[in-house]
Structures are given as C-alpha cells and as structure tokens.
Image (spheres, rainbow, N blue to C red):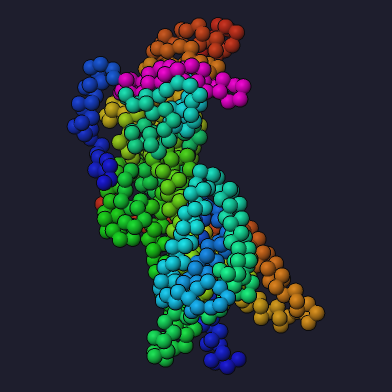
Amino acid sequence: MLAGVGWHLAVPAHWDSRRKGVTGGDRILIRIEHVSKAFGGIQAVDDVSFTVAEGSITGLIGPNGAGKSTLFNIVAGLIRPDRGRIFLEDENITGQRPHQLFHKGLVRTFQVPHEFSRMTVRENLMVVPAGQAGENLFKTWFRWKRVREEDRRVLERVDEVLDFLEIGHVADELAGNLSGGQKKLLDLGRTMMTDARSVLLDEPGAGVNRTLLGKLSEAIQRLNTERGYTFCLIEHDMDLISRLCDPVHVMANGALIASGPMSAIRQDERVREAYLGGGASGRMGAPG
Amino acid sequence: MELSGIAAYLVSFFTFVGIYAILALGLNMQWGFTGQFNIGVAGFFAVGAYTSAILTVPESPWHVGGFGHPFLVGIAGAMVASALLGLLIGWITARLRTDYLAIATIGIAETLRLIIANESWLTNGVRGMSGIDRPFAGVFQTLGLTSAMGTLIVVTTFLVAVYFLVERARQSPWGRVLRAIRENEPAAEAAGKDIGRFRLQAFVAGSAIMGLGGALYAHYFGFLSPEAFMPLYGTFLVWVMLIAGGSGNNKGALLGAVVIWSIWSGSEFFMSAALPDAWSGQSGPLRVILIGVLLQVILISRPQGLLPERAPKTVPFGKVANRKERA
C-alpha cells in the first residue's frame, strides 16, 4: 500500500472536518511535559513544558544556546530526554526513533538543510512516501510493473510539490547544487510528500534571501490554512515569527521563560533581558 | 603464440574478468549504493569458494567432504553461507558508523583466512583443496567445447543475471532509499526510513553476490588455497576496480573489472619481460605498487571513476513526458 499517493492540492474532504474540529476547541497535538536534558555539566533543557495546538503555527524563540534545537531533537526522537515525556495526541512518544515518528505524522526539517546531495531534486522527494512496494527488494525483481506504476503516481505528487514550492525548474538538478534557500524549500517539500500532521521546522529562514524567504513563509502559511498542517518552528527572524506564529514560546538557558502572542512577548521584561542581557532597555531586534 | 594459445588465454582472461566483475557488483551494492565500507571482501569470497568446494568435491582423506552435490547446489550453498556471514556482521555493526564496519570486516576476513589455513580437517589447510569440478563439463564436451570455455559461458550467464538484478535494484525505490542513506542518514531517517534494516539488506545481498563470485572462482580454478584470499587479491583489486570504474555505477563496475584486470594481468608479462633477471623476484610487489599508483592517479584526476554515477531514469508520466515533447 502506498500511503497518501493520489492526494491533490485541493484540500481533501477529511481535512475540512479536522480543521472545523480545531477551530471548535483547540485540540492539543504535541504535549511536552517537564522535559530535561543535560550534556555533561550543561543543562541544555531544563524542565520545559508546553503544548502545540492542532492547526497552530507555534513559534519557539530564544538566544543562541537557549536549548531550542536540543528540545526539537528530543521531540523528533533524535535525542532521549533525561526526564520528562512527549505526547503526540494521547500517545507517549518519548524515545521513539525519527522513522517511527514519521509514520505517526510527525516530521521535521533541519537547521542546516539535509538534502541528498548526489540525487536529483525529484529523487529527493520521491524517496519520502511510505510503504512503496519497490522498497522491497524482491518486489523490485518480480513485481517491476507494479513498482513502476507506483513510481508514476509518486512522480505526480512530486510535480505538485515542485509546483507548489515553485522549484520545478531545478527538478533534474542534483540537490547538492541548489542554493541554500532552495535547499530549505526542498526540505519543506520532503515534509509535503507524506500526509504529515505536524511539522517541526528548525530555523526555516536561516540563510535564506529575502525573496525566497517570502516564498517560504507563504508556503508555510498555505500548508497551514489549506492543508491543516500544524507547525512548530524555531526561528531567529522576528519578522517571520510575528508574521506566522501564534503563540510564541521563549527559551533562555534551557528554561521556558515566556509564552504568548508575539505582541505580548515583545513587551515581556524577562525576554528583553534574555536577549539583551542586564535589563537594557533597547527594542528587541533580530538577534543571531 | 599459437592461435589456440591466444584463445585459451582470452578464455581465462574473460573468466577472471567475469568473476571479479561479480565481486565488484556485490561491493557496489554495499559501498556504491549504501556507503558501507566493507574491506573484507576476501572473507566473503573465501566463504563462497570453500562452501561450494566442500559441497561438491568427492570424498578425500585430507578434508571434510564427499557430499558430491551438483554444481548448482554448491553455488546456492555458497551464496547462503556468505549471506549468513553478511547477516551476522551486518547485524552486529548495524548501529555503528561505517568506519567500525571497515574494522569488523577486515578483521573477520583475516580471521577466516587463518581458520582456512589452520583447520586442515575442514579445508586441508595451506596444502589446499583440489578436484573441484568445472560446471557441466560433460554437457559442454558433447557440444564440442572445452571445460574452460564452458566455465566462461556459465560465469558470463551468472554475470548477466547479477548485473540485471543489481541494476534493477539500483533503479528501484529500494536503491533510492539506499542512496539517500548514503547521502544523509539523519534525513533518510527523518523521511521515515528504517536505515538499519535497509543497510542490513544491502549488506547481505552484496555478501551473497560475493559468495557467488567465490564459488565460480573455485569451480574455474579447480584448486583452492588460503593464498588466493589474501587481502591483495580478494579485497584490494575489487576495490580498485569499483573505484576506477565508477562507484555507484554498475556499468562502471564492469568496466573497472575489465580495465584493472587487463592492467593487473598484463603487468605480469610486462614485468617479466622488462625486469632484469636479478629483479625477477620483485615483480609481484612491483605490480602492487603499480596498481597503488594507478589508484592514486584515478582518485586525483577522476575521483568519480571512468563512468561516474548517474541518476536512474524515472518513469515517464504526464507532465514530464509532455515537457520532453515540447523541448
């Protein structure tokens, strides 16, 4: 069975019902409970709890070294927490491997784009769909027609994703030759090759030029509203954060220090202190 | 040289090329597709060769045997035995980085060679096993072919089959996942792939192919001794072939086998003709230096090999096909 192939840009019916449920009563999709992690003597994440509501674009900000990426890696299954638990809906997913979480609809991108360099952009996307018959060696030998038939359907979806992200012109280019921004789009594209419910974006805007950044944030917004993707993203670009995210959580020195809409965060004294140090009274800019 | 002598040489030449090409294809599955650094090819080669020999030779007072199974049973047994060895090593090293796989494979290959050399009840030790029959010699004889020519036909048939299966695997979603793992493990895992499982499959399949190469070697040569499975012949040459030909590219593996075997076997004539008598004992090491230098030249001047890896053609479908037509 090839999960999710034959999905189209138009919002499928079941998304509608799900989104109605969301607006009704903010269902919790990801719940982070008292998570802690130390590396040697450094408390990278210190008793952090927050939730990500279904259908939201939740932001996670904080100065460098605040523990955001560590927390992300814990949620995504790359690092085991010392203490605390992660729930995806009602299931405890603490310590599950990334490939297991993928099949539960929780996918991620990386701070530094993780493309498959010596594979074409098209192939980068074709890898993703789960349960392709051709991933079984014996089926590639003895069920070749079926494998090719499935590949054709995967390719249709690839084309939709390429169109959506407007990177169709580099489809046959090796991914390693793309610009940093295009690689970020490709990373995002890989999350679109599955029926993801929640996507963790680790600094989607880092190293992306203004033009591409606009495209990227538009893509995120459209995925959110048209397809009901829930996002949780780490970002340093405050413009991007205030444009996209509500609510926003702020971390500093491993701990969660503030949560709320960006307008409130901007006024928060502890946040200013964390960013600027020593309680200076400057405006919170775009650090890092 | 007489014409029949040249013909016999060519038969032997292409039989060796065929056997080494099979080994290179097996290594390509492990290293070229998946990035698994197996520097113990000789171990899988040896297990295949000895397994098939033990299963097929007549009874002998010098070593275990006397099963007298037919050739194809020997081949199947060789592939299964090598696959099991691959499964064991792959399973142990599955969670480790590829550098550890390298250490594990070379260690096990050397251990196996020492076992073969010392457990003479099993393999007749350094004196070697003889009397391994060439495949279907009787059938080829009635067709008026020598057993060597028959073996070349059998080796070529297996090579074509292996090439077909390995190339199809490369073009399939399975091969795509392997290359994704090679390129970026965390991203492949984030894309929902159980990388441990895929790596193990590639390693076991590659090992089975190497075992096949070993079995064919045993039946062509008719005699086995631990000498043949020194890292130089069993591992190093196969690696040079794959890298020279183009790792990741199955056609490159074939081309590499032809080119490197030409240079390797040609250098034997060249050295014996060109070296003064006093140096004749040094020709072996000099040939190794020659191959080593050649490898350096290739890595510097053409690191991707003679035939660099190319993305498999994807299936044509609506939009792509239309774009091509318009172009």
- Residue name at image x 29 percent, y 44 percent: A157
- Residue name at image x 45 percent, y 51 percent: B200
* Residue B113 seen: no
Say left or right for A133 vs B177: left
Residue most toward the front?
A: B61
- Residue A41's x, y, as percent? 62, 22
Query: Would you place residue B114 above or below residue A69 in this image?
Result: below
Residue A265, by quadrant, is top left
Q: Nearer the viewer, residue B148 or B59?
A: B59
Instruction: Give the overall secondary structure of the magenta segment.
Output: strand
Q: Which quadrant: the C terminus of chain B?
A: bottom left
- Residue name at image x 71 percent, y 70 percent: B285
Q: How many numbered marks have been drawn onto this rendered protein structure?
A: 0
Q: Which of A258 and B9 is in front in this view?
A: B9
User: Is residue A18 rendered magenta in the image?
Assistant: no
* Residue B288 seen: yes
Say left or right for A260 vs A132: right
- Residue B272's x, y, as percent? 71, 81
Residue most toward the right?
A: B278
Query: Would you place residue B298 above or below residue B193 in this image?
Result: below
Query: Would you place residue A273 above or below residue B255 in this image?
Result: above
- Residue B2's x, y, as percent? 58, 93
User: Is residue A29 rendered magenta in the image?
Assistant: yes
First to last magenta residue range: A28-56
Q: Nearer the viewer, residue B83 or A165?
A: B83
- Residue B1's x, y, as percent? 60, 91
Residue B155, by quadrant, is bottom left
- Residue name at image x 59 percent, y 21 percent: A42
Q: Nearer the viewer, residue A55 or B190?
A: B190
Say left or right for B289 vs A159: right
